[in-house]
Amino acid sequence: MSYTLNVTGFLLKGCIITLQLYAVTIVFSIPLGIICALAKISRYKFLKAFLEFYTWLFRGTPLLLQLFFTYYGLPVFGIRLTQEQAAAITFVLNYAAYFTEIFRAGIQSIDKGQYEAAKALGMNYRQTMWRIILPQAVKRVLPPTGNEAITLIKDTALVATIGMGDMLRAAKEVVTRDFKISAFIIAAVIYLLLTTVVVYVFKKLEEKYSVYD
Amino acid sequence: MMIKAENINKSFGKLHVLKNINLEVQKGEVISIIGPSGSGKSTLLRCLNYLEKIDSGRIEIEGEPIAAMDQQGQKIHIPENQIRRICRKLGMVFQSFNLFPHKTVLENIIEAPIVVKKMPKEEAVALAEELLGKVGLADKRDAYPSQISGGQKQRVAIARALAMKPDIMLFDEPTSALDPELVGEVLSVIKALAKENMTMLIVTHEMAFAREVSDRVVFMDSGEIIEEATPEKIFKNPEHPRIRAFLDKML
Ligand SMILES: Nc1ncnc2c1ncn2[C@@H]1O[C@H](COP(=O)(O)OP(=O)(O)O)[C@@H](O)[C@H]1O
Ligand SMILES: [Mg+2]
C-alpha cells in the first residue's frame, strides 16, 4: 500500500509538468485559433495563403517530429530553447492549427441570413462577428474542441521523448527501477481521471449552450 | 421623398436581374411588389438597403445617396460607414425571419439599439417591451426563437426591426415561410403599421392583402417593372396581359 502511495506521489510530481503544458497549450492555442480562423475568412489574400500553409504544415506532419525539430533541430539555426519552451511552442502552434480549422468551419457553418439580419440592423462587421456569429459558432465547435482537449492530455506524454520528466517518463523510471508494472497502471488511472474531468467540463458546456435549441 | 431609385441595374454573373429599375417612394406610402418568382423582387429590396451592391444607377434614401454615378457613368465611392448610417433609416424583415437563435426574444430586440445606437439598456428594454406589446408577444419576452411558432418569430422580427426606429420598412415575403393559419397574425401587424403611416415596401404573394393595404402596387417580371398603379387598376384592369396571366394563376 505504501509502495502504491509512494509511486502515486512520484507520478503526481510528473503530472504537474503534464498539467502545466496542458494549461499553456489550451490558454494560448484557443485564442490563437480564433484569431487565425477570423483571418482565414477575411479578405486578406496574403494572410489567408500564409495561414493555409501553416495549417497544412502543422496538421500534415507528426507532432513528435515537430517537437524534435523545435528542440533538436532549431539549435542548428542558432536557436536554443529549453525543453519547456520547445514543448510549449510546439504544442501551442500544433493545437492552434487544429483549432483554426475547427473554428473556421464552425464560423462558416452559420447561416448567411444571420449576417444579413445583423447588417440590416446597422451592425458593422466586428459587432456582427463578436455578438452574433462567434457565440453561435462556439456552440457548434464544442464537440470537436472537446475531442482535441482530450487528445491533448495524451499528447503531452510525447514530451518524455525530449527528456522532460512528465508523468509517463516518471512511470517508466519506476517500472525500470522496481521491475513492477504497477506504476504504469497508476499512470493510466491518473490519465483517465484527467480525461474524465475534461469530458465532464465539455458536457457541462454543451448543456449550457443547449438552452437555445 | 423617402426612396428614389434611378435606372438601377444589377447582374449576378451573366444573369441580368434588375434592368433599369426606377422607383420612387413617398413618405407614408405602402407599396406592394408582386410578380412571379425569380423576377427580381427580393434583389430590388436587397439593393435598397445595401445587402446587394448595384452595378449602375442611383439610390437615394431620404435625399442621401447610397449609390451614385458621375457624368461619365463611373461609380462614385461612398464610405461604408456613411452608407451604414443612411441605411439605418430602413428596417428589413426577411422571409426566413433570421432571428438570432442564441438570444431570447427580448435580447433579439434590444441588441441593435444597444450595440449600434448605444442606447442605455433600461431604455432599450422598455422600448422592446412596448414593441412586444404592440405585436402581441409580451409574454414571450424570455423565450428563445426555437420555442415559438413561425408567426410569432416573424412578429418578433418585425419588433426587432422597429426597435431601430426606421422611417421605412422593407418586407420580403414575410408570410411565405408560414403555415397558412399563421399568416393572418403577421399580416395584421403589418396592417397596423400601415394605419400608423409607416412607409413600407412589401414583397408579397398575398394578393388580397396587397390589394387591401397598398397605396400602389408594383408588378415586376424578368427584372423589369412592367406596371405600377393603384391596387384597383392592377387587380381589376391591368394594362399588361402578363399581369392578368399572373393574377389568374394566383387567385
Ligand atoms: N446571390 C445570388 N447569386 C446568383 N443569382 C442570384 C442571387 N440572388 C438571386 N439570384 C437570381 O436572381 C434572380 C432574381 O432573384 P430574386 O430577386 O430572389 O427573385 P424574386 O424575389 O422575385 O423571386 C433569380 O433568377 C435568382 O436565381
Ligand atoms: Mg424573393
Image: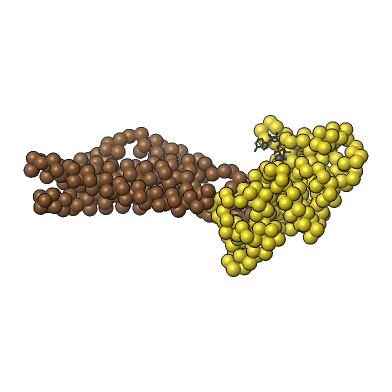
Is residue A182 at all visible to an observer of this figure?
Answer: yes
Is residue A93 at all visible to an observer of this figure?
Answer: no
Q: Compared to B10, does B65 lie above or below?
A: below
Q: Quadrant of residue B240 in the image?
A: top right
Left/right placement of residue A12 relative to residue A116 reads left
The colour chain A appears in is brown
Who is closer to the viewer here, A16 or B212?
B212
Residue B86, percent from left and from top: 69, 56
Left/right placement of residue B118 relative to residue B189 reads left
Q: Compared to B108, does A81 lie above or below?
A: above
Residue A62, percent from left and from top: 30, 35
Who is closer to the viewer here, B134 or A154?
B134
Question: In the current view of this chain or complex, which residue is farthest to the front?
Answer: B181
What colour-coding does the image apply?
by chain
Q: Which residue is drawn at 27% across and 38% down?
A: A64
Which quarter of the frame holds ligand 2?
top right
Residue A174, percent from left and from top: 12, 45
Q: Which residue is drawn at 69% across and 43% down?
A: B179
Q: Residue at x 14, y 43 (%)?
A: A182
Q: Which residue is drawn at 18% across and 43% down?
A: A185
Left/right placement of residue A68 relative to residue A95 reads left
Chain shown in yellow? B
Residue B126, percent from left and from top: 63, 67
Question: In the current view of this chain or complex, which residue is farthest to the left?
Answer: A178
Q: How many labels does the image show?
A: 0
